[in-house]
Image: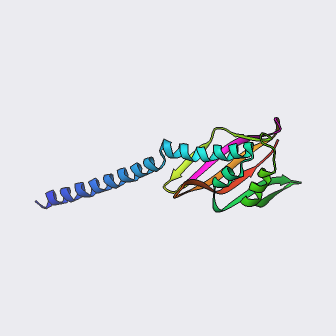
Amino acid sequence: MKQLIWVICFLCLFAVQVSAQTNAQTTSVTTNNDSEKAAVLLVIKQTFKAMLTADTVLLKSCFAPGAIMHVVQNQKDSVIVRTSKVSDFVASIGKQQPGSLDERSFDEIIYIDREMASAWAPYTFHRNGVFSHKGIDSFQFVKLKDGWKIQYLMYNMYQ
C-alpha cells in the first residue's frame, strides 16, 4: 500500500511538471505569434515610410516616449557610438524632400515576449534614388496601450 501511495505521488508530481512546461510553451507561442510579429514589422515599415514621405507625425508616432537612438560608426581603427535624440532625428527628416530618403529592410528577425520585442533588420539606404549605404537596424520595442513602439534603436552603416 505504501508503494502505491508513492507511485501516485510521483505521478501527480510528474503531471504537475508536464502541465507547467506546457503552460510555459503555450505562453511563449502566444506571445510570439504571427499577428504580433506582423504588428512589430508594421512599425518598422511605418518608420521607413515616414522617412520616405518626410512625415514627421507618422515618424514620431513610431517611437515610445523617452526612446533612445545610437549609431555605431567605424572611424580610424576605432568604434564610436553616437547618441541621437529622437526629436532631432524627426526634425531632420522633416527637412527632407519627400522621396529623397529610402530605407529598405529585409529578412527581419523578430522575437516577442509579452510586452517586449526585439527585431534585427538588415537594410539598404538610398538617397535621391542612389544607393548610399547598408547596415543593420537593431530595434527594441515595448507594447504600450496604443500598440508597439520603438524604445531603442541602434544601427550601423557601411558600404
Coloring scheme used: rainbow
41 relative position to 98: left or right: left
| Residue numbers of the magenta segment | 117-129
Displayed quadrant of residue 100:
top right
153 relative to 136, above or below? below
Question: Which residue is at a point 73% across and 60% down the rendered structure image?
Answer: 87
Whether residue 44 is in magenta: the answer is no
Residue 73 in percent (x, y) is at: 81, 53
Residue 12: where, in percent of width, then height? Answer: 23, 57
Q: Main secondary structure of the magenta part?
A: strand
Q: Is residue 85 visible?
A: no
Residue at coordinates 62% horizontally, 41% vertically from top-left?
108
- Residue drawn at 50 percent across, 54 percent down: 113
Residue 107, given in percent of the width and then of the height, sits at 63, 38
The answer to whether residue 117 is visible is yes
Can you tell which quarter of the image residue 106 is in?
A: top right
Q: Taking 100 as reference, is 118 above or below it?
A: below
Residue 120 painted magenta? yes
